[in-house]
Structure formats: C-alpha cells, structure tokens
Image (spheres, grey):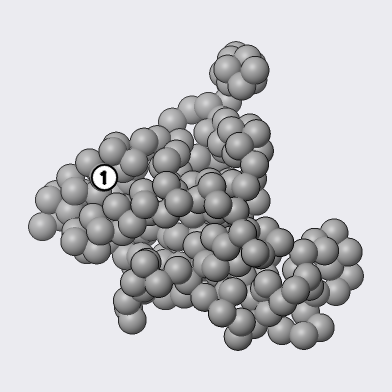
Amino acid sequence: MYEDVRELYLKSGFGGRVGFGRKAAIVVIDMAKSWLDESSPQGSSKLGSVLDNVLALLDVARRTGHPVFFTTMAFEPGDVVGAYGRKMLHLSSRGSLDAGSDMTELDPRLQRRPDEPLLIKQRASAFWGTPFDSFLVGRGIDTLIITGCSTSGCIRATAESAHNLNLNAIVPREAVGDRSETAHTANLTDIDMRYADVVSVAETIRYLEGAAATQA
C-alpha cells in the first residue's frame, strides 16, 4: 500500500533528497512521561525502541559536539481554549499536560544537560511560539535531525516547519514513533516525500561522526 503511495509521489515529482548540510543539530521531540507512560491518554508502550535509538544518537551528538535540543508540551490553566481545545480533548484530560506536572518532564534516561535547551511548546511544531528558529540561526545550523514522537503529529509538524524554513530536515526512521503503527508508516512515507529525508540511524551516526571530523 505505502509503496504504491511512494511510487505515485515519485512519478509526480516529489521525493527529492535534501541531504545533510554543513552543520547539524538534533532535536528530541516530547520524550516525556505523558507520551511514554501508558497511564497517560496519549501514552504508548511502543516507544521503548525509539527511546533506545534516540539515546544512541544523543551519545554520538554529544561526543562530537553537535547541539542538542529538547521539547515538551505543557499548558497553564486556561491555555486550552477555542477550536484547538475542542479538537484536542486529551490536553485537559487527567492533567497529562499540565504545566508543572511530572507528566511533562523529560524521561530521565535522556540526561538533558544544562547547555541543551528545553523548548516548552503548545502546538505540534517545535517552532510554533518558541525561539527555536533563533537558536538554530545563532548557532549557524543548516541541518535539523528530528527524533522522538509522535510521527503523525509533532514529528511531521516539526519537519514541515523545518522544510519551510529551508533547513535540511532529516528524520532517522528508527528514532521516531507513534502510538499507531498505521499512522506512523503512513506519515513517515509522507514526510519522506514532502518535507524531510527519512534515513537510518546508522546513516545519521555516520554523518555526525564525519561532520565532526571535517570541522575539527
């Protein structure tokens, strides 16, 4: 099914490769308890291997000096209003995304460092309503490696924003996940054809190590 979609896109002129650029950063999207704990409305038990692959990429990025960013989603009382609140009913359910709740805290295994910014967002894209773009411009970043969850929501939205900002958007396929395998596969296909290069974790690691050697 998805190969048919891919073939259709390719015949229509989609699916070009953006490639890795000169200087990369990695962003870890929403790897917090609210997404990793099944007791949460949007939590899933399917993200264990995703976290393992994110950790592998973080290890290389830190060792080679590539900037690292994190996001989580959190809302103060009264923030979830209007059409957005009516669509996203889970945002006000059981306090899973309340500002200050332990549900919005990053998984401790990520071991975020003091020099690794944490962006608090209220929409799917890591760029919406945050200073993320300014952080990347200030560091001369032209390549954004996008990891975390969920593929059909925040990964896709962040990849689209990165693409619109003319960044080289890279999505390591084993380092992103979703509560629905169908949604994951469908959106990963669409991301690869429209917004970013979907590549392996191994290829991403080779780039990070090679880029560090070149810049040394």
The kind of residue tagged 1 is: Ile
Residue in the foreground of this view, choosing between 168 and 185: 185
Spot occupied by residue 126 in the image (x, y as percentages of width and height): 56, 63
Spot occupied by residue 151 in the image (x, y as percentages of width and height): 58, 46
* Residue identified by numbered label 1: 205
Residue 83 in view: no
* Quadrant into which the C terminus falls: bottom left
Task: Judge left or right: residue 68 versus residue 122.
Answer: left
Task: Judge left or right: residue 72 versus residue 109.
Answer: right
Spot occupied by residue 117 in the image (x, y as percentages of width and height): 42, 75
Q: Secondary structure at mark 1?
A: helix
Most distant residue in the front direction: 39
Classify residue 94 by image quadrant.
bottom right
Residue in the foreground of this view, choosing between 146 and 51: 51
Q: Is residue 215 above or below residue 197?
A: below
Residue in the foreground of this view, choosing between 175 and 196: 175
Spot occupied by residue 171 in the image (x, y as percentages of width and height): 45, 43
Residue 43 in view: yes
